[in-house]
Amino acid sequence: MALLSRLILLVAALLPLLPLPASAQESYPTRPIRLIVGFAAGSSGDITARIVGHELGHLLGQSVIVENRPGASSLIATAYVAHAQKDGYTLLLATVAATINTSLMPGKGANFEKDLAPVALVGSIPNILVVNPTLGVGDVKGLIALAKQKPGELLYGASGIGSGPQLTAELFKKMAGIQMTAVIYPGSAQQLTDLIAGRIQLMFSPASTVLGHINQGTVKALATTQTKRASAAPELPTISETALPGFDTGVWFGIMAPAGTPAAVIDKLATATNDALKDADLLKQLHVQGLDALGGSPEDFRRFIRSETERWAGIIHDMDAAKKK
């Protein structure tokens, strides 16, 4: 009896790891899908997930429920999906943070490239450098000059250690030759509250999070972070063109599933994602958030992840080397 009990427990533990039968793959999905986001409600990832998830649900014939599991710069969400059942019902909205974590916190939670399977890229969005309007600077060069006058005194907000905006700020510090102090938050909402209140002086934020505040005048935008001007704010210059040539960072989003999810399910999800990104209504909503749609095959996404991982590994290596000097 003891042996039989152990065998039953072993089979139960292995069941989630077994591939779906062919009939289940063909009929997928037959129940709601969860799309896990590693950042808080109201963040750019959360907004993107809800826009895309709604259209995916329409195309797949099942609800796509967005679930926020913030913390540890998306490591918690990544690990959760990596260890979920391999059936296509638990997906991850991956971001640039995941490729950063590969080098910044190796071996923590999950191996991003090995434990997750790419489905399709969704889109990309630049960060916008915003400051409190009372700071008294009108452009990036003015901010750099002020930071040099007050080394370490300017406080910048960031969503988690090692997040895209935080490393963007670190790259900015390195290229500008300045010192600023990080204030780490669990999400963008409290950062914005503190920026508007003057408790921090600046932040690099995805366009979707701050465009409304820029238009209202509660924060002042200085520049965007990609080499190409943002389609949602073409009047804003880039950091590269105004102060630091070659400066280029941004945020991207893509859908992933646990590694081992049947290829037929991955392909169905990829097709639905690419079809969703052709919808005029969805594209309009993404544009309002400052996001440019991407799409592509699972293999396209896999190559992109590899190149992003290598890119951020180089930046993190340079930062670590600078700290040791």
Image (cartoon, rainbow, N blue to C red):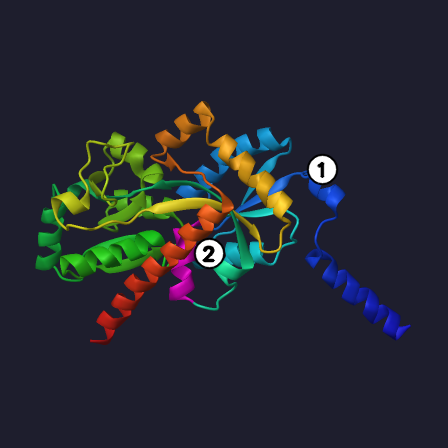
The residue wearing badge 1 is: 27
Can residue 153 be seen in the rendering of this structure? no
Question: For the residues marked 1 and 2, what is the alpha-carbon distance in whole angstroms?
Answer: 34 Å
Q: Is residue 96 a member of the stretch shown in magenta? A: yes
Residue depicted at x 55% and y 36%: 271
Tell whether 149 sits left or right of 87: left
Residue depicted at x 40% and y 50%: 304
Q: Main secondary structure of the magenta part?
A: helix
- Measured as percent of width and height from the top left, residue 237 is found at 17, 38
Q: Dot 1 lies on which element?
A: helix
Picture quadrant of residue 175:
bottom left
Magenta span: 94-105
Quadrant where the N terminus is found in the figure = bottom right
Can residue 184 be seen in the rendering of this structure? yes
Tell whether 43 sits left or right of 269: left
Sequence-earlier tag: 1 or 2 = 1
Q: Dot 2 lies on which element?
A: loop
Residue depicted at x 25% and y 44%: 226
Residue depicted at x 71% and y 49%: 20
Label 2: few (<14), some (14–19) or many (≥20) C-alpha neighbours in 10 Å: some
- Measured as percent of width and height from the top left, residue 80 is found at 57, 56
The residue wearing badge 2 is: 71
